[in-house]
Amino acid sequence: MARILWGALVRPSAQPCAPTKVATSGHRASSTLPSRPFWCSLAARIVKPKSEEGKSEFTLKATAKELKGLRAKNTRDEEAMELSDLRKDPRYPEAFIGGVFGILGVKHDEMPEEMKGWKYRIVFRGQDVRSKTGTGLVGLLEEVSNSPARFTASQCAPAAAAVTGKEATLRDVEQAFLQGLIDTPGWVPTWTELPREWWPDEWFVHGDRTRPRFHRPARKFRRTLYGHPEAGAIWEKVLK
C-alpha cells in the first residue's frame, strides 16, 4: 500500500504524474490528464446510489449491517411519532428536526478484489436542520466547535513512515460519534425522518409495504450521528 502511495506521489520519468502542457496555435495551452491515478489518501471510492453497484448485493448487505449496528447501540427510540403530532406535543417545546441519508463507499478500491471492503454510513443531514418553533439554530445549538484531525494526514503519515523505514501506529474508535449521548437534560432533542425504504415492517398495516401507517414518521435520537452539528464537540467531551 505504501508503494502504491509513494509511486503516485513521485513522478516517474517515463510516466509523468503532473499534466503535460501542449501548445496550440491561437489557443491557450491545454493539458493532458495525468497518466496515473493520484492516491493522495487511499480514501474509499464513493458509489452512486442509483448506479448498478448501488443496487448490488454488496450494497444491501452493507446497508443492513449499518442499520443493525445503529439498532444494537440503542441509537434511537424505536417508537415513531407522526411529524404533525410532534409539532403539537407539549412534552417537546422545542426540537431539532432533520433527515438522514446513506453514503456507500468501497474501501481500498485500488487494491486487489479480496482486499476491498464495502462500507455504508448513515449520516444526519446537518445542512438541512429545522427547529420545531422556527427559532434560529445558532441560539439553540449547545456545542458546535471541535478540532478534527485531517483524514489525509492520518493516511499519509503511516505510508511515509513505511517508505522511510520508520514505525507508525494509528488508533481508531469504532463508531466514535455514536458513543456520545444527545438525549440528555438541557439539550434540545433531535428527531429524524427516515427514507421510506428504511421503514420497518411494523410501520405498515399487517406488514404490507403498500399500506403505510404513517405519513411522515419521525424518531427521536439518543446518540449523535455523523453529520449532526454537535457531534464533534460531544465526542470530544466523551474523550475528556
Image (cartoon, grey):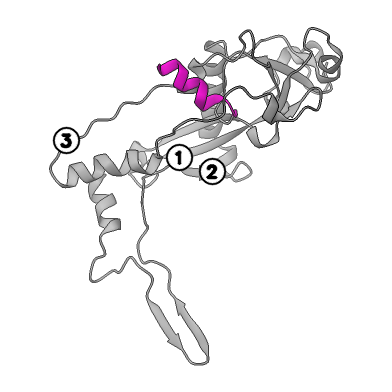
Can you tell which mark lies on residue 141? none
For marks 2 and 3, give the one nearer the viewer.
Answer: 3
Label 2 vs 3, first from the N-terminus: 2
Contact flag, marks 2 and 3 (Cβ < 8 Å): no
Specify the principal SS of the magenta part: helix
Check disc 2 and give the amino acid type. Val
The part of the image, by quadrant, that contains residue 23 is: bottom left
Tell me which residue sits at (30%, 57%) in the image. 8
Quote the CA–CA distance across marks 2 and 1: 7 Å
- Judging from the image, what secondary structure is the residue with disc 1 in? strand
**How many circles with numbers are drawn on the protein?**
3
Name the foreground residue: 32 vs 138.
138
- Relative vertical location of residue 8 with respect to residue 56 in this rendering, above or below: below
Can you tell which mark lies on residue 106? 1
- Relative vertical location of residue 120 with respect to residue 17 in this rendering, above or below: above
How many C-alpha atoms fall within 10 Å of the one at disc 2: few (<14), some, or many (≥20)? Answer: some
Is residue 29 inside the magenta stretch?
A: no
Contact flag, marks 2 and 1 (Cβ < 8 Å): yes
- Relative vertical location of residue 204 with respect to residue 110 in this rendering, above or below: above
Quote the CA–CA distance across marks 1 and 3: 27 Å
How many C-alpha atoms fall within 10 Å of the one at disc 3: few (<14), some, or many (≥20)? Answer: few
Q: Is 18 left or right of 26, judged from the image as shown? A: left
Residue hosting label 3? 167
Residue hosting label 2? 47
Tell me which residue sits at (52%, 87%) in the image. 27
Label 1 vs 3, first from the N-terminus: 1
Tell me which residue sits at (57%, 16%) in the image. 223
Tell me which residue sits at (64%, 25%) in the image. 141
Q: Which residues are magenta?
A: 228-240
Quote the CA–CA distance across marks 2 and 3: 33 Å
